[in-house]
Amino acid sequence: MIFSNRSEAASLLAKKLASFEGKNPLILAIPRGAVPMAKIIADELGGEFDVVLVRKLRAPYNPEFAIGSIDESGWAYIADYAEGTGATKDYIEREKQEQLETMRRRRTQYTPVRPPIDPAGRIVIVVDDGLATGATMISALHALRAKHPTKLICAVPVAPPDTVEKVKAYADEVICLETPVYFQAVGQFYAAFPQIEDDEVVEILRKSVQTVRRKQ
């Protein structure tokens, strides 16, 4: 299946997540691509919306390829193939520090008006626009598990079968609409897949905060 765009993918995911409607789920996006998707899902399920910050650790000679990931606390997932890409221990440590600094900058930029929403005791649904290696999703789920949600769900439109199996170890449930065997990149499964910029993320978060305040 080819999704028209992220909005269509989000609406289809929301239908699969309909059992959580009315249960005030917390929908967390992995920035940046999943941010508009998570907002759509939160609106359709009547839940809250926020971001979970994690970063890919990039392969030395192929920055698009993930050799692992890191969360805001500094916990890192390192794939078993990382060394085979030429990533030495020193390289990985430098990459971890660079990505931690990016997350600190983004946290300041994204949520200056309030702290992140506490996932403790909540149904938490982590959304991305697709998984390739699954590295960033693994870090996100690991970070959130430590904060004691009542249920932790991964929801994505597309991922290869082996990645879905890998991610299942970190979530209570994995919802994936398409699991193609022939998988090169997430973008190949979207007719339109524009890059989401930081200013768009900030605007979506700002509007969501304003909506919550009006309801209070």
Image: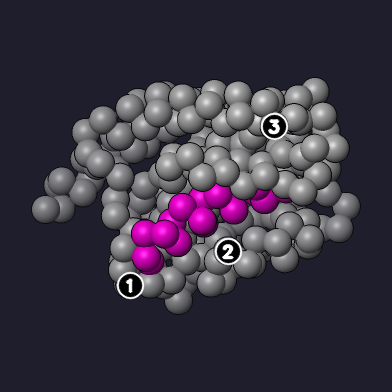
Q: CA distance from mark 3 to mark 2?
A: 25 Å
Q: Which residue is mark 3?
A: 89
* Kind of residue at disc 1: Lys
Q: Residues within 10 Å of mark 3 (few under 14, many from 20)?
A: few
Residue at the (21%, 33%) spot, across then down: 113
Q: Nearer the viewer, mark 3 or mark 2?
A: 3
Tag 3 secondary structure: helix
Q: Nearer the viewer, mark 1 or mark 3?
A: 3
Q: Which residue is mark 2?
A: 170
Task: Give the side of residue 152 with respect to residue 170, left or right.
Answer: left
Q: Which residue is mark 1?
A: 23
Where are the magenta residues, as a range?
A: 130-149
111, above or below 160, in the image: above
Q: Residue furthest bottom?
A: 19
Residue at the (53%, 72%) spot, across then down: 172
Does 169 appear in magenta?
Answer: no
